[in-house]
Image (cartoon, coloured by chain):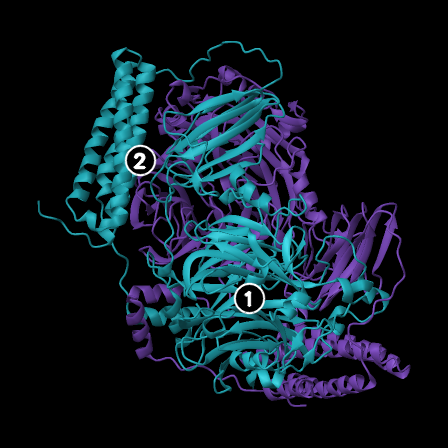
Chain colours: A purple, B cyan
Amino acid sequence: MQLFGKRALLALSAFSFGLVTASTSWSADSLDDVMKRRGLTEKDVLAAAKTYVPTGKRDEFLAFASGGQSGQVIVYGIPSMRILKYIGVFTPEPWQGYGFDNESKAVLAQGRINGKDILFGDTHHPAISETNGDYDGEYLFINDKNNPRIAVIDLHDFETKQIVVNPIMKSEHGGAFVTPNTDYIIEASQYASPLENGYVPLSQFNEKYRGAVTYWKFDRKAGRIDPKQSFSLELPPYSQDLSDFGKGVSDGWSFTNSFCSERYVGGIEKGRPPFEAGCSQKDTDFFHMINWKKAAEVVKAGKVKMINDHPVIMMDTAIAEGILYLVPEPKSPHGMDVSPDGKFMIVSGKLDSHTYVFSFEKMMNLIKNKDFAGKDPYGVPILDLKKSLHTQVQVGLGPLHTQYDSKPCVVYTSIYVDSQVTKWDYCEGKVLDKLSIHYNIGHLMTMEGDSVNPKGKYLVALNKLAIDRFNPVGPLHPQNHQLIDISGDKMELLYDMPLPLGEPHYAVAIAADKLKPIIRYKSGWNTRTDEVHEGKTRPGKERVERDGNKVTVYGTTIRSHITPEIVEVQEGDEVTFVMTNLERAEDQTHGFAINGTNANLSLEPGKTASVTVTASRPGVFPYYCTEFCSALHLEMQGYLLVQPKGYKEVATKGAEGQAYTQADYDKQFKTNIETQGVIDSVVGYIVARNYQDFPPVVSLVEDATEQLGFAADTRKKAEEFAAKNDWQNATLWAGQWWQYQVKAADIGLRAKTYLDQHGAVEVKK
Amino acid sequence: MQLFGKRALLALSAFSFGLVTASTSWSADSLDDVMKRRGLTEKDVLAAAKTYVPTGKRDEFLAFASGGQSGQVIVYGIPSMRILKYIGVFTPEPWQGYGFDNESKAVLAQGRINGKDILFGDTHHPAISETNGDYDGEYLFINDKNNPRIAVIDLHDFETKQIVVNPIMKSEHGGAFVTPNTDYIIEASQYASPLENGYVPLSQFNEKYRGAVTYWKFDRKAGRIDPKQSFSLELPPYSQDLSDFGKGVSDGWSFTNSFCSERYVGGIEKGRPPFEAGCSQKDTDFFHMINWKKAAEVVKAGKVKMINDHPVIMMDTAIAEGILYLVPEPKSPHGMDVSPDGKFMIVSGKLDSHTYVFSFEKMMNLIKNKDFAGKDPYGVPILDLKKSLHTQVQVGLGPLHTQYDSKPCVVYTSIYVDSQVTKWDYCEGKVLDKLSIHYNIGHLMTMEGDSVNPKGKYLVALNKLAIDRFNPVGPLHPQNHQLIDISGDKMELLYDMPLPLGEPHYAVAIAADKLKPIIRYKSGWNTRTDEVHEGKTRPGKERVERDGNKVTVYGTTIRSHITPEIVEVQEGDEVTFVMTNLERAEDQTHGFAINGTNANLSLEPGKTASVTVTASRPGVFPYYCTEFCSALHLEMQGYLLVQPKGYKEVATKGAEGQAYTQADYDKQFKTNIETQGVIDSVVGYIVARNYQDFPPVVSLVEDATEQLGFAADTRKKAEEFAAKNDWQNATLWAGQWWQYQVKAADIGLRAKTYLDQHGAVEVKK
């Protein structure tokens, strides 16, 4: 079959320099045609132009949204509203190997509650780490409402590194929010419960059920929460809700609102009015003002009760130390949003039509003067509402959350019942604009809008209902995030974005250029502990070790083979594969999955990850690379063979499926030499241009050079076997040499295309 | 606090008719401004206009992509490239309750292998059900490469209904593809293995390892695969790969290609050349031509061997019956794509630069005349390559897959190594156009491009590497699907779409108007078995039943309460919550999660789903609705209380947290009467317009009417308690009455906004 080898080669030379011409040029007419054909208005085209990000260009901001009961974090770009990543946090996710490799299983195991795996979370409020109140883009924190926990995600690699379990809460909502220098992360309870773990009848609700707020100490150097340095405050059995930290003048304080300060216990099944009736009867609830800096000192002084081995400042102590105050707020509030300068706290009650602006200065004066309106049933001092207010503004029906613009005094409040966003001035107390959204907005987000330095430009409405907005996909609808242009006087709706998985509650957006994620790990890296993996394996050092019935396979992956390719074990063995991805090139991830075992690893460049499987039954279990990594990806395979107990190995040598002769070797050799000529011409094309001005091309050249090194190594093997007239091995190694050449050519062509498309110029020698 | 109730009411009247004015009008200048500011070319604006879907408008096509090793299916719209849904298939996903409720756990349990839960899959090739070779939009099928399985997804509700486990394969790749009337779904093995489950040493590879192809019988009426009517064919130990069914003239045949027909067994760890070298050494591999209609008759005639209780036609029988033939194809092929008329089979070998067009007519003549080029080592007749070919075309380096245009003879082939798409004419055998993509394209997809009636218009390049295309999000990159306009002579790149989770291999796209998903279930529906749930509960019939230590809670959800609100059980009880969502309104999903238990249900309107938890330790476990469903969503809560073993209940009555007087009742009553006035005016506004011309508004009016019915019921309760001077209950029920009014107002305002935005007109009475 002379046909093939030769033609493949010819194609390489014929097409690698072929012109890929640009498509039909644009004209005003054709835009009109498209508008007519697609029924677009001029406003639509403007919105399209404001959100479209052309191929190869980047988004201006990155948003991190909670995934709600999907237990994940969602990352998307603004203004394109394209989702870039789902980060596994509380729920296993096999594409990332999260919860499938031993290293990430260890992270999930940190989240066990009373020894039990809890493999989902109800993530609500992400927070980006801050330095001096500004987002610094280093870490992301996210809470779990259902099983009170906080997770730490490192934004250098977008991986979850730690989960801490709240020792005293049974439900939470008011986390995660950080202090201006990320000293602490706050977590506030939701549904009151006993702080201990035992049973307490609901008839003792007022006496023994409690709320709480936990301050988790963050160790920036370690990149982890330090539970030993963390503490909590006991709170009344109101349903605590959203929180925020003070900043600027109010730094040192935190604010946590509440609903159901009626302390109502439902029981519709017994004829009692339901929770929703009893929890919304009073006109006001309370927000809690807590002096956390002083609280930390009280903890240091040992004035705590240890509950479940965790230090808790009890209410009596908090009252005596002047740490805890209550301020009336409109009933059933959602948001608690501190202004960039820290002077004001904005709160909306979802059953009121007003938003309330509280003055930190006024409240501090009341506290200083001990000018209290009374005490709650637990003795907590209550400030007077009117005396604490800066202003209140009628914003619409069902106001929930408020976010800040870069323009002074300008804020945006989500209006749930009216399905609107209201833009208003909190200094002057007047409404500026209203915009309908679709439908029933929950949270909303401006760019860096809860930092000391909001960036304006865009607002995202996190709508709770999509209803008719998208193509129908069954009874379970996507969420709808709507992008709104806030750069002008009037808000303009730009884009409807469906959320295909999960229900985001809150989101935070950061200027994209503040994020500096890595593209590869140091070779042999345990990415969950951030240290060299003890099972790191260098090329050539792959091996199988046995210790009793424990077998450890120290393996590697590289385009396009897994080493080892055959692993034989005995029934009953516990087999651990510790795999290192030797690649250094960007995006050269390999996967590793074994039939019938639940084993699936995602091995990004440099990563070492492991999986342990029990060889519970004899059989043949293929394994392979699950990430399409190269032309020979499907051939990146191997076999795990499990011999039956007591199997006696018979040393037989199977026949080769195909035998090769000197003619085969000569043909392959000739092809390779000709291929090298083509590669040389591609290399010549690249080095004749200013490729060193293009970092991605520099990386590609490094990668291609490595592949050519491998090619040279295998050529040597082929020639050695040929010298011994072993045409079988000579031909196969010559084939492998050609495979490395193909990989080098692939990379070289990609580099050439990049140079062509980015205006590289010829350099004079 | 006179402030609140009154103001809330005023707001309702003040804002419900408030004008939401349109934003600044568009002008040519401002488009220029945006282009300048954002650095957009005219071509970019044209691409933006071709892909932007304005708020409330729909996409033209829906794509279903495999999720790769995420184990899911991804649904997105074309041309907007917005992802609409991730469907849980092989991997648990809590947002959908998939793998978290008992009903979907039963689906996943069907996918157990040798009794072991396999909680991920490597999904590769989705197929839409067909009628007469046309997509009918009823079902979707998807395969699992790692643990050979096929899943059935019902496109009426986008839920996974069934998983079948292949009884003889250990790995597969060539599924799922369907016959023109979806009689059968094909699944072809990948890495050869013994068809039985035991251990066989690799030295017996040629003799005892085998490939196979399985034909799964689909029972359209049941909407399920019928394993009893399904069968397989034994194949040689080549690595079988992609498949396709014949259609038109070739209906009755299927085609499955292969690589590594060298039957090479690697072993790089022992110094052998790796699989990639030995599996790509020959110039040709083989595709299998199988007469599946005749095979089905052979099975009926009982000429099978039962392997693992499954009927398998052995190779000798297949050869004797004239069912199985081999045709040489370029080595290491990927695609196997039958033309819309069934006359041609297009195959690309990724290490060749040519694409091969095989003629069904020529091959059938060779078979008819027994004009064979030889036999393979297993006796399977081999057709001559040149005699089988219609033409071969040099398309570029690393061609993989081919898809069909609506224009006759026009096809598109993905070119992996060159990172291009080649448009060519398979009748004339000439290249028409080439377009660079980014980077290393795997599959590609045209609209309904593998049906008998391709729709043209768009092509999507499913690229395997994104590298520098998007904002960096760490070492693990998103995939990049690029949308290409194929309506003109030249291909035009329109859009880069990141895939945030999973690695799609193949995708299929269907005209959106062919899909008719439901928006609600019949009340009390078990959505996984498609029948009335045995635990269906009607409102007012909620109850807790005990049978020994088994407790069953028959509960309901509706805006905004869960019934029952308090459940008390004993330590050691096994507690099953069977929850029915009573809602009928579109998108009114409720969630149900219990602290510390892994319980999370997604209850779409009408759905009944259950979860069983063991009360393993005494304590207080809050439960709540996890979908933000209404203004009082946070108050949609309850408590599971677990009493310690031997706990003696003391009948104590807890004090109410808040006491209400006649004055409280009177105030609430007055608010409600005034609120009713406002609702009446909203209702008046709606019914004065042609709202019945707008189906979404008709639904909203039905929903609002239901809420007002609930309001009337609770008003009656409030008045009955008031008549008995029970002001506590009277006030709380009056509060609940008001809650229903707020829900009705919410819906009414949404309806009013819809009418305003869709040009409703006043109707004369």
Front residue of B243/A199: it is B243
Residue behind mark 1 = B294
Residue behind mark 2 = B743
> Looking at the rendering, which quadrant does residue B35 occupy?
bottom left
Image marks 1 and 2: residues in contact by CB distance under 8 Å: no
Front residue of A272/A167: it is A272
Question: A457 left or right of B385?
Answer: left
Front residue of A459/A652: it is A652
| 1 and 2 marks on the same chain | yes
Q: CA distance from mark 1 to mark 2?
A: 62 Å
Asked if residue B108 is positioned above or below residue B40 in the image, the reply reads: above
Asked if residue B486 is positioned above or below residue B134 in the image, the reply reads: below
Q: Amino acid at mark 2?
A: Lys
Q: Secondary structure at mark 1?
A: helix
Q: Position of residue A751 (x, y in %)?
A: 62, 78
Q: Secondary structure at mark 2?
A: helix
